[in-house]
Amino acid sequence: MNPHHLAIFPVLGLLCISLTRAETPGKDLLADKTLPDWEFITAVPTALDATCTLGADGVLAISGKPLGYLATKESHENYQLFFEWRWPANAEKASNGGVLLHINSGPVAGTPWPVCLQVQLKLDQAGDLLPMATARFAEKLSSAPDAKPPQLERSGVASEKPKGEWNTGVILCHGNVVEVRLNGVLQNRVSQCEPATGKIGFQLEGFPFELRKVRIQVDGVISK
């Protein structure tokens, strides 16, 4: 065997290890079937296991009802959030949900939603980003003034996969900057976010969906 080939093997081994780690970084937030890292916030107190079921395959099935949101019990800052989601193959056209970042309150202003930023996961709009309640960021909202809700539309090409297929999301939060990548495409970037730290959540807006591989890695680094 060529000795130069032998020299390559250790490098390839290290590369494989790095790739494996890159696929499953940080803390697994769905590692325990009892979901100890999460709570369910809704107008009418509802047990978490009444709306969420974690299967042996690591898939969290979420009924979507009642309206509310899953939230981490701990606040986070300077992190990368990795997750995969999918809508059922027979999902309604209006299927809606989102990732909530920097949650800094309970429900406010007579709504089910807290002060936070929301990354849209709504069908055909995944990657849009909006401030909720008193949250804000520097970039001007780009949707029509009468849009409900007004938001900063995604800047990348549509990267959602068809209903029934898994999508991959990577959200980087560093300082007061947030970047959103969906299926490898940079879809949004906002700066001067207020609040810039807080809990992480997933919205329940009446439509069933599934999550898996929800992981958080601290010390997120925003790309240039």
Image (cartoon, grey):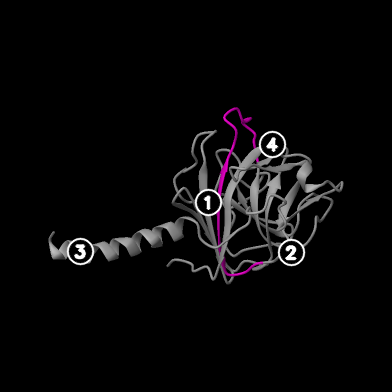
Q: Which mark is residue 104?
A: 2
Q: Is residue 114 magenta?
A: no
Q: Which residue is mark 3?
A: 6
Tell us which disc is closer to us: 3 or 2. Answer: 3
Please, what is the three-letter code of the amino acid marked with disc 1?
A: Gly
Residue 105 pos. (x, y %): 78, 62
Of callouts 4 and 2, the N-terminal one? 2
Q: Can see residue 161?
A: yes
Please, what is the three-letter code of the amino acid marked with disc 3?
A: Leu
Of callouts 2 and 1, the N-terminal one? 2
Q: Which mark is residue 207?
A: 4
Q: Specify the segment rendered in magenta.
A: 76-96
Q: Residue at x 71, y 65 (%)?
A: 74
Of callouts 3 and 1, the N-terminal one? 3
Helix, strand or loop at label 1? It is strand
Give the Cα distance between marks 4 and 1.
19 Å
Q: Which mark is residue 111?
A: none
